[in-house]
Image (cartoon, rainbow, N blue to C red):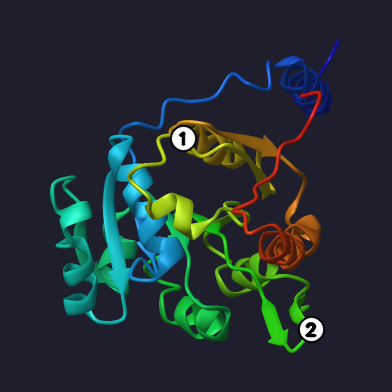
Amino acid sequence: MTTSDDAQPVNAATAAKAALKRDPWDLPDVSGLVVGVLGGTGDQGRGLAYRFAVAGQKVIIGSRAAERAQAAADDPQLSGLGVEGADNAECARRSDVVIVAVPWEGHAKTLEALREELAGKLVIDCVNPLGFDKKGAYALKPEEGSAAEQAAALLPESRVTAAFHHLSAVLLQDPETAEIDTDVMVLGEARADTDLVQALAARIPGMRGVFAGRLRNAHQVESLVANLISVNRRYKAHAGLRVTDV
């Protein structure tokens, strides 16, 4: 006779097998989620805010100063899309999903200050630690391993993922560009969380979210942006990525 103690690992194994059999493209409905963008006054943040707002998401732009955030939200490109502006803390409190798009130099300080407001939230880190010199862009390696791992260390009560690293801010903000032709590498520790991020990526026409591993693999994803900058400079392009055969 199987006891409840005996049944627990069996049930866990059964659940794991069932998860493996799931269609990887069977993603949840995320249309009702409120998306907050910390650093939404910068080019990348504004571009993401614009694309999600056009797709029908409720979007809140966050900044250290509420006035700057509201000024960005009042921009003619965003003002008709229901985008709101708020200081970072208010943005974090009111959002279901929070995208971190702040400069690398302010990454740790920003997240440390928002630990309480981001508790329990799904956090998507898209920060790329880069340096620049006469030879061009090059990757930096944070002590924690990556920007995403630094976020996870600073936000122990948040569900930290990593995504949206390889997007052109120029294309994101261009209203004449109807589709963003690229895949988004999504990393995280829980499938439910990475599925949500993939589903959000799919809200933007032309874009697809692809699971790319756990957060320990975030460094090479963040670092690849240095290569894309070199590609774009040489070919005067706004290059993205496509993953083949999936």
What x and y, as percent, mark residue 71? Answer: 17, 71
Which residue lies under the disc numbered 2? 135
Residue at far bottom of view:
134
Q: Is residue 120 visible?
A: no
Quick one: label 1 or label 2, which is nearer the N terminus?
2
Q: Nearer the viewer, residue 14 or 236?
A: 236
Q: Nearer the viewer, residue 179 or 23?
A: 179
CB within 8 Å, label 1 to label 2: no
Q: Give how far apart the Cα atoms at labels 1 and 2 are.
A: 32 Å
What x and y, as percent, mark residue 23? Answer: 68, 16
Q: Which mark is residue 47?
A: none
Residue 208 left/right relative to 66: right
What element does badge 1 sit on?
A: loop
Residue at 39% in and 67% down = 38
Q: Which mark is residue 179?
A: 1
Quadrant containing the C terminus is top right
Judge the density around disc 1: few (<14), some (14-19), many (≥20) Cα neighbours within 10 Å.
Answer: some
Q: Is residue 185 visible?
A: yes
Residue at far front of view:
235
**Residue 111, relative to residue 225: is it above or below?**
below
What element does badge 2 sit on?
A: loop
Residue at 69% in and 67% down = 149
Q: Nearer the viewer, residue 119 or 14?
A: 119
